[in-house]
Every structure is written in structure tokens, then in C-alpha cells.
Amino acid sequence: MSSLDAAGSGVRDLLRRGLQGIASFSVFHPKSVLLVVAVVTGLAAWQASTLRISTDVETLLPRNVESAQRIKALLKSFGGSEPVVLAISGNGEEDLEERIDLALAIRERLLDHPDLHAVTGLFGEDPWALLEGPQAHALLLYLTPDEIDRVARQLTPEAIDRRVAENREALRSPLGALAARLYAEDPLGFAGLALKQIGALKGGLRIGSREGILVTEDEAYALVLLRPRVNTNDIETARRVLGAVEQAAREALAEAEIQGTVGIGPPPEGAPPGQIHAGLAGAPATLVGFRSSLAGDLRLVSLTSYFAQLVLFAFAFRRIGGLLIAGSSLLVGAIWALGFAAVAIGEINIFTVGSIGILCGLTVDFTVHLYNRYLEEVHAGKDMARAFSISHGETGVGILASVGVMVWAFFAAGLSEFRGLRDLGLICGAGLALSLLASLFMVPALTALWVRLYPRPDMPRGLAGFGLEPVLTGVVRRPGLTIALGSALTLALLYPAARVHLDEDFSRFRPQSNPAIRLQNEIAARTGTSLQAVLALVPGASDEEILERSARIEAGLAPLAEGERAELAAVLGPARVIPPPAVQRAALDRLAALRASGAIDPDAVVRELLAAEERNGFRIDDRARRAAERVRAILARDTPLTVAEMKDGPLADLLDDLVIVDDRGQRLGIVSAYPRPTARTVELIPAMREAIAASGVPAELSGARALTQEIRPIMLRDGIVATVVSAVGVTIILLVAFRRLSLVLLTMVPLVTGLIASVGLMSLLGIDFNLVTISMLPLILGIAIDNGIHVVHRYVEGIEGATREDMVEVFRHTGRGVVMATLTTVVGFGALLFADNPSLISSGILAMLGTTATLVAAVTLLPAMLSLLPVPGRRAAPPGPR
């Protein structure tokens, strides 16, 4: 143990001499120091100007996550997995036809665009798609044998005559040209029978189709869905795609001479009520808005934190010179950190956008402690050089230990498999070290220049007292009671801390002020789904196998779309558009049997149909004869409908979305499950996986929700590993610094109680943990230990021969610095509350609660415990007045 003590003392002496050398050089050569600082800062600012804002979440994901790899492969071979949603709003039913015509015109302009194609007939409610393609002669193959029997019973001469008479009566009512066309093209209603089968695709969606355009049931929106053919995770590609849609919308508005607006999200503020607006939503629109939000968060969080630190510093020190010193050191440290980020990483992402705000809250502590100790020594009669020698040589050693712990904690985040967390740890860890270096040189150099300019002696104002003296007096005089109350409160918060809820849904991390998200939420509320599906990727060696397997998947998922508490709104797969081979074989066999028995005679049905139309006053022209021939072909069908056949018809685009070939050449069926807005990922994805497993199909889930579920255990494991590594590193650093296990354990008391209290308070306040806040725990561990280090370090310096009254004074001086440092940290994390990103806000709340709770423990529990330690040479306190 003596050799460890000797080694520790040698390290401390070496650090002390080095820090005193920095103080001495900076005091006597301030201009040289500041010149070097200015040059380095200029270079860092130049590098920082090259930083780019990255919104590509895909690059931040671990490489070994299967869902992430599936999404990447899908994007590579399939383009954008989520559509661009063009939502045309107006004045409800009054201008619905005008908006449908506008939607058709926009879609027409984009038909030949290389980066987009329209998703038509998504929910199978467009009869013309069934009547105009190869499937027009296979409509009965969508039906079950029993349904085909019912059709046969409606093909008697009497039934045909009755149906034609009903058509005639319907046409006399004001149904319009579309209804007239439908009765002419499909006189026996075969398309309607097939549509009832395909119409099950709609499920619980409150949405319909008009001329191939989706319309919400309340007629508030006419929707055009456009699937990108390219990967729109790239911001420039997303802008190009959205620009093409916006241009097409503006051209269509101009051609129709409609006064309207176009843009991402809902109608702009100030737009006349009921005016037509073509709003963009969907993943690419969200991404573009997200980048603007991220850039805004970076500016707002950083500037808010910076100026809030200066206001707090000015309140505490009440010195203009101190304010300039703190502001300059803080600014230089932030620029150096950004310059490092530009060189080492090159970008700012969703995880690192709050890093400068966090650093401002942490690094101003260096100036607080150094400047506070300098003032304390000056007021004790020391000259500037001696005062900074003591400040750097004693307080500086404590700061180094504190920074070492925090840097270790941030670098522990580098063990994460998530690049975003590694980047955050790297920027904050390196930023702390660089900011400390700036403060060690700049605080004495700027102070020396200020004193030369204004040589008046400093009045002993020091830091604001923060009411610590009476608190500490009570703590030191009644340590047992303090420890009992603190322990009881901590134990009381342990129960809610153990019951804290983990929110695993990444969708709730999106900035809710994003215009695209606001419009998307509005559409979701009106339609019953966000149109952002969970995809089941169904492999198959042939189209027939894909159809059979997709049918089993769709049947397995169907119960999840039933009932009042259904998790899914609708399920869309290739087997809903093309009947699987088994269904077709059963239909073909029944048709063959009915033809063989004479129950269905195609030629007789056609003759009777034409005769009935003539009797009921219909004109028998080429159009009527073509419709009759279609009836003959439907009833005489004896071959199955294939995917290849369908891809030559109007449903080709829809099938391109449902049956694809990936980048490895594997054929895949895409079954899309559309969750209800209230569906919880933690329940939905396991239920879907269970249904797929029960189907026996080797399908895999893809999409953001599936990715969230797969990321969860990795983030939890990363959080645990980083926390353990951080704790081990903290313990080693503290052992080197204090050389006594008892002091190390006491230093951790504020940390442990603070973490329990913060998590318990999160639970009591109803604030959920999420995967981002969990990843912040090891970082908070390194930050929160800072208070305990400073209190114990000053205790070690001031205990020899001290009375309890002396100890109150020792704790008071350090306590003021600790309170100030904690407040700056709270303000730094508090700046995250001004961010637009919910994950940054929740991280800021956790850190604020943690550092505040740690502060309370550091100025109550820790002094109480330290005052009970046996100290050789401690003098008894003189008796007080009776």
C-alpha cells in the first residue's frame, strides 16, 4: 500500500508542478498565450465551417443488426420503402371533384419521372383496374367455390333479366357518367364481386378510392401516393424528389387556374380557410424538415446554453472582468470542440446536435473553480502569481481528476455499436480535454491583462453564498440525522425508480413541429393509419410460391386487424391482388364442374344478356358486345392468372411494389401491415413475429418499428457495458487521486443517490425512459461524480487539525463552487429543453434531475459522512455559549 501511496503522490506532485508552470507562464506572458490561442482558434473555426448536418439515420445504425441490413438492401433494390404523400386539402365535399381532377393531373405529370412512380389502386377499390387488364377475364378466380355457386344461380334467364332491369332503373337516377360507364362495362357486376374480396385490403382504414385517387372518408383530403425509385435517405435526393412533386403540383394548379398553395406540411399560416393546398408528407418530406429542425436545434441549444452560462456566471461573481474571462474561455473551448468534430467525424447528427450545449454546461465549471479559488487566495493577501499557482496547483488537480472521470465516461460511450453514440462520446470527451486546456491558459492570461488595464484591487465579493452556511452548519453538527433523512428519501425513491417505464417507439422521437409530421399525424387521425407499414419480406423460388406463402402470412396477420383493440388497420400483400394458386385451382375446378353440368353455359349467358339489354331499351353497339364477350371469357376461363400476366396490365405498378427482386437476385413478396395510430411497437412486433412463425413461412420483418425492436437489446447491452466500464474507470481514477478506498466510496455517495433520485423522479413525473436516455446514463455517471470529487478533494486539503467550525468553512468555500458548477451543468442540459427533438428533451430532463439530485447529496449527505471520519489531530470544538 505504501508503494501505491508513493506512486500516487508522485503523480500528484508531477501534475501540480505542471499546472503551476502553466499558471506562471500565462500570468507573465499573457499576450503570447492569447496570440497562440487566437491562431489555434482561427484554424479550428475554419475546420468547423466545413461541418455538415447529417440526417441519415441509416449510417448511425450498427452493422450487425439484421433489420438495418434488410432496410439497406431493400432501399438499394426497391428505392424508398415509404411513399411521398401528396395530400390535397380544400373545402370538403364542395370542391372534392376539383381536387380529384387536380390529383389526377399531378399524377399524370409524374408518370414518366425517373425517380417516382404513382402507387395506384393501393387498396383495390378501382374497378377499372380490374376491367381493363389481363385479370378482367379472371374475375371469378378471386371467389370461393361457394361464391361461384351463388354466381351460377344468378345466371338464369330470369335473374339476368332482373339484373339488367335494375341497371336501367339505376341509370335513371342521378348517378353520373362514372356509374353509367360501370354498368355498361360490367353489366353482371363481376368486378364488384372480385372487389369485395380485394376490398378486404381496406380493413379498418377510413379511406376510399375515386378514379384511382385515395380519398379520406370525411373527404378532407385527396391523396396521391408516390413511391420513390431511389433511396431518399440522402438529403439531396429527397429534395430533388420533393422538388419534382412540388413543380408538378404548381403546374397543375396554374393550368387549372386554381388559386392554391404547395409545400411541405399543412397549409401555411394566413392561407384563406378552404383554399386548396397540396401538402407533402411521408419519409422524404420528414427528412427535409428534420434537417432544418436539426440545424435549428444546433444553433438554439448552443447559443441558449452559452448565454445562459454567462448570465449565471455574472450573477454569481458580479464582476465584468470575470464575465469576459468566462465568456472568452467558453467560446474558445466550443470552437476547438467543433473544429475537432470536423476533423475527426465531419458531421453533426441527431445524437451529437446537443454536444456543444452540453459542453458549455460542463466546461464553464473549469473557469468557475479556477477563478473562485484565485479570488479566495487574492482576498487572503496573495499576489496574482501566487494566487494562480495555488489555484492551478491545488484546485487544478481536482479539476483534472474530475475531467479524467468525465472524459473516461464519454469515451466509454465509444464502446457502443451505434455510431451516433460513439460520435457523441468522442466530441464531448475530446471537447472537455480541449476546453480544459483553453481554460488553464486563458483564465490566468486574461486575468493578468484585465488587472493591467484596471489595476484596482478586487473587493472580496466572491461567489454568491446560495444559503449554504446554515445548511452546512446543521449538517456538520447533526450528521447522523442528515444521513438518516437522506437514506430514507433515497430508499423511498428506489421503488418508483425500479418501476420506470421504457418507451421503445422511435417514432415518438421525431420533432412534432416538423410540418411533414404534423400533416402526417393529421392524415393518420383521419384514415386510421400513418401509411408507414411494417413489411414482411416473403422469399420464394417462384411467383406461385410467393403467392402461397403471402396468403398464409396475410391469414396469420388477419386477427391482428380485427376487433376494437386491433393493432393493425389493414394488410396488403400480393395474394390479395392475385389469388394464390390453391384458391385459383379450387375456383377453376368449380367453374369446370358447373360448365360440365350445364349450370353455367357461357354462350347461353351472353345470348340472354344481349337479349335482356335489348328488351330493356339498351343500345346494342360495339361497347355492349365487348362487355358481353368479357362475360363469356370470364365464365369460360380455364387457366390460372399469373404474376407475369398481371404485370402486362394496369396493376403492374402495384405488383412492382408487392413482388420484387432484391440486390442478390432473390424474389421477395412484400406484405405490408399498416398499424393503427394507437399501436404500440413493443406489443405489435412480437405479435406479428408470433403470427408469422405460426404460419410456417420463413419471412422477415422490416421497417422502422421492426428495427426498433431489434435495436432495443443492443442499446440496453451497450448502456450496461458502458456504465460498467465507466464505473470501473471512475474507481481507478479516484483511487489514484485519493489513495483511500473509504474516500473513493464516499465520493460515489452523491452519484449513487443522485442516480436513484433522478430515475425515481422521472417515474413519479410520468416521464418515460427511452433508448436514447438509457444510452446517456454512463455519460451522466461521469458528469455527476464531479461534485463528490471537488468536495472530497477540498476536505482532504483542509482536515488536518480542523475543528467542526473550520470544516463548515472549508465545505462552504467549495460548496459555493460546487453549487455554481452544478447550476451551469443544469443550465447546459436545460438548453436541450428548447430543442425540437423529443429525445434531446428527455435526455436533458434526466441529466438535469441527476445533476440536481447529486448536488443536494454533495452538500448534505457527503459532508455529514465526511465529518464522521476519524481525523488525527482534529481539535475539539470550543463549547458554545450556554
Image (cartoon, grey):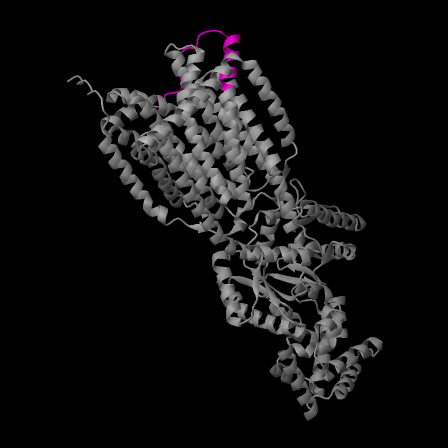
Does 346 appear above or below 539?
above
Q: Residue furthest front?
A: 3
- How many marks can you see? 0
Q: In which quarter of the image is the C terminus?
A: top left
Question: What residue lies at 37% left-to-right and 23% top-to-bottom?
Answer: 816
Kindly identify the residue that appears in the image at 39 percent across and 21 percent down: 394
Quick one: 128 or 459, which is closer to the camera?
459
Location of residue 207 with respect to 25 vertically, above or below: below
Over which residues does the magenta segment extend?
Answer: 442-466
- The residue depicted at 57 percent of the width and 58 percent of the height is 528
Q: Is residue 592 magenta?
A: no
Q: Which residue is outermost to the top?
A: 456
The quarter of the displayed image where residue 600 is located:
bottom right
Q: In which quarter of the image is residue 548?
A: bottom right
Observer-nearest residue: 132 or 846?
846
From the viewer's perspective, tell me whether residue 86 is left or right of residue 184. Answer: left
> Would residue 372 be visible to someone looking at this image?
no
Quadrant of image for the N terminus: top left
Residue 295 is situated, as x and y percent measured from the top left of the image, at 61, 37
Frontmost residue, 436 versus 184: 436
User: Is residue 341 something that shows in the picture?
Assistant: yes
Residue 619 x %, y %: 82, 78
Residue 123: x and y, percent?
Answer: 65, 65
Q: Is residue 567 above or below residue 315?
A: below
Find residue 735 and report its horizontal and vertical position in percent.
36, 34
Q: Which residue is drawn at 30% across and 20% down?
A: 809
Determine the image quadrant of residue 179: bottom right
- Decide if residue 816 is on the left or right side of residue 804: right
- Return the residue found at the far left: 882
The reply to whether the magenta stretch includes residue 461 is yes
From the viewer's perspective, is residue 395 above or below residue 54? above
